[in-house]
Image (cartoon, grey):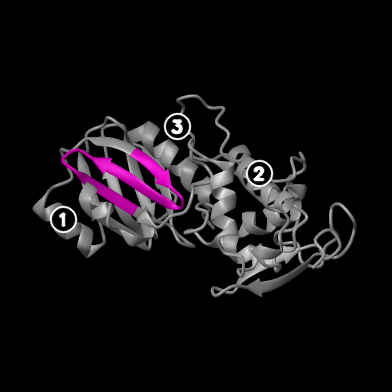
Amino acid sequence: MPEGDTIYRAARTLNRALAGQVVTKFETQLPRLARIDDDKPIAGRTVESVTAAGKWVQMKFSGDLILLTHMLMSGSWHIYRTGEKWQRGRLSMRVAIYTNDFVAVAFQVPIAEFHTAETLRRHRSVITLGPDVLSPAFDPQLVAASIAAHPDMPVGVALLSQFIIAGLGNVYKSEVCFASGVNPFRTVGSLRDSELQSLVTNARNFMLSNVADSYGSQIVTYAGLRRTTSRANPSERLWVYGRRGESCRRCGAAIQSRKQGPDARVTFWCPTCQPG
């Protein structure tokens, strides 16, 4: 499932491949996008930049046009060299952007919209985003204050709320809480200052470590499995997520899980390391 780190890497790769390139062909299966393309053709425009904001990707074209996409649970962006075979069939394609050297394909993207700079400034889901965990302007005190402003909310729910803190997903929610020794079902108001700071620090560090860039200007589409434990063994890459009934890597207790929040997302935790 795409989380903020996945979206960040996707935007970085798309930007390296497409920024400064002229669109030679545009395809879409989405009628709303097709109507815009009919009226204001995408082909001939230059891709100015591709950036991530939380879990949103913003692709800016010349002529004040922005393609905004959100992957939700199943969507993904792929990048291919011209003539390279796609890994998924055309029936899964929602958007394809061609340049002389590359083709960027959005598969099963559930949200894709064209905006101008003005309409994007009014987009509720974008303008209400909380502090972005991966932003260069990341301010730990601002992020801590954003979380603390919701004292009655369970910690796990707060970490997933994009209007409080942008970028974290269900995997990181559980992993950050474990690393901080915080039970995800406690309320934000019950946190000591040191626990709140630990959550913020671990969220930032985990996300940064999973978007570390060692490829320079290369076009890299796969960066390995998400890790939070720093262990070399791929089977030991996460602390608690997806490990219900297995032994805690620290204390040996059985990992537990339970649905949490309005979307009933499954939360994993160690009852010994994260006492309620």
Q: Is residue 185 above or below residue 20?
A: below
Residue carrying label 2: 201
Quadrant in the picture for residue 50: top left
Mark-to-mark CA distance, 1 and 2: 43 Å
Residue positioned most to the left: 39
Residue positioned most to the top: 216
Q: Residue at x 34, y 61 (%)?
A: 124
Tag 3: amino acid? Ile
Q: Position of residue 151 (x, y in %)?
A: 61, 65
Mark-to-mark CA distance, 3 and 1: 29 Å
Instruction: Say whether residue 63 is magenta.
Output: yes
Q: Which residues are magenta?
A: 50-68
On residue 219, the disc is 3
Mark-to-mark CA distance, 3 and 2: 30 Å
Q: Position of residue 187 (x, y in %)?
A: 67, 67
Q: Are marks 1 and 2 in contact (CB under 8 Å)?
A: no
Tag 1: amino acid? Ile
Mark 1 residue element: helix
Residue carrying label 1: 36
Closer to the camera, 39 or 258?
258
